[in-house]
Amino acid sequence: MKVNRIFILAFLVTLFSCSYSSPKEREIIDTINKSLDLSMIMNIRQGDRFLSYEDFRRRFKYISVVNLKKGCQPCYPKFKEWQNKMDSMNINDNSTLLFIINAESYEDFLKEVTVGDDFKDRYYTVTDPKYIYNYRNRNIPKWIINSGILIDQDNKIKLIGAPYSNVEMTKLYHKICSL
């Protein structure tokens, strides 16, 4: 009888220890399939051209949304890294990259990014000087908002983090975007 109790106790400890999620894992699980609020966006910039948010959404089924801030020193290389890495991933025609930049002007942010080089911005940007994006998405942990988020055509969160960060993330990104 004592052996059975020890076996059952060992089984229960093993069962529950394997199913434990860290607080960060729990936040990821809770955030997947939540809606990202982009309702404050009217127009989107790509280089020197502008298009309406509606036209932008009609063109792309999946969007990687990256939140950056003027004055944030790690954000400047992150802006370049996302663009360069996404270029090398061979993303398909139904997906793209959108930067939401917390700055008064796109030009001011870009000046900080391009100090000393001839970097060319190739993807889409929106300036958000009043942090409306952050406010409207306050139900999503800030670290997730700042990690990069892949959304689908319904603005549902499908992937959290940089899709180029490792092989598994890249495969998952391509699998999602091919649906």
Image (cartoon, rainbow, N blue to C red):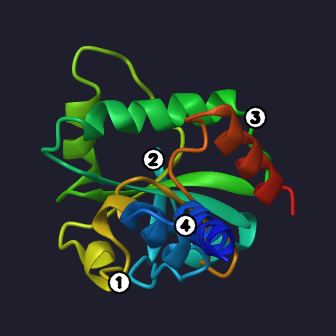
- Identity of the amino acid at label 2? Asp
Q: Secondary structure at mark 3?
A: loop
Q: Position of residue 90 (x, y in %)?
A: 75, 34
- Give the labeled residue for mark 2: 48
Q: Is residue 128 above or below residue 39?
A: above
- Give the labeled residue for mark 4: 13
- Give the labeled residue for mark 3: 90
Q: Rounded to the nearest whole Å, what is the CA distance between mark 3 and mark 4?
A: 45 Å
Of tags 2 and 3, the one toward the viewer is 3
Q: Rounded to the nearest whole Å, what is the CA distance between mark 1 and mark 2?
A: 33 Å
Q: Residues within 10 Å of mark 2 (few under 14, many from 20)?
A: few
Q: Position of residue 165 (x, y in %)?
A: 55, 35
Q: Residues within 10 Å of mark 4 (few under 14, many from 20)?
A: few
Contact (Cβ within 8 Å) of mark 2 with mark 3: no
**Nearest the camera: 138 or 122?**
138
Q: Quadrant of residue 80?
A: top left
- Give the labeled residue for mark 1: 139
Contact (Cβ within 8 Å) of mark 1 with mark 2: no
Q: Is residue 108 left or right of residue 170?
A: left
Furthest residue in direction right, as rendered: 179
Q: Position of residue 13 (x, y in %)?
A: 55, 66
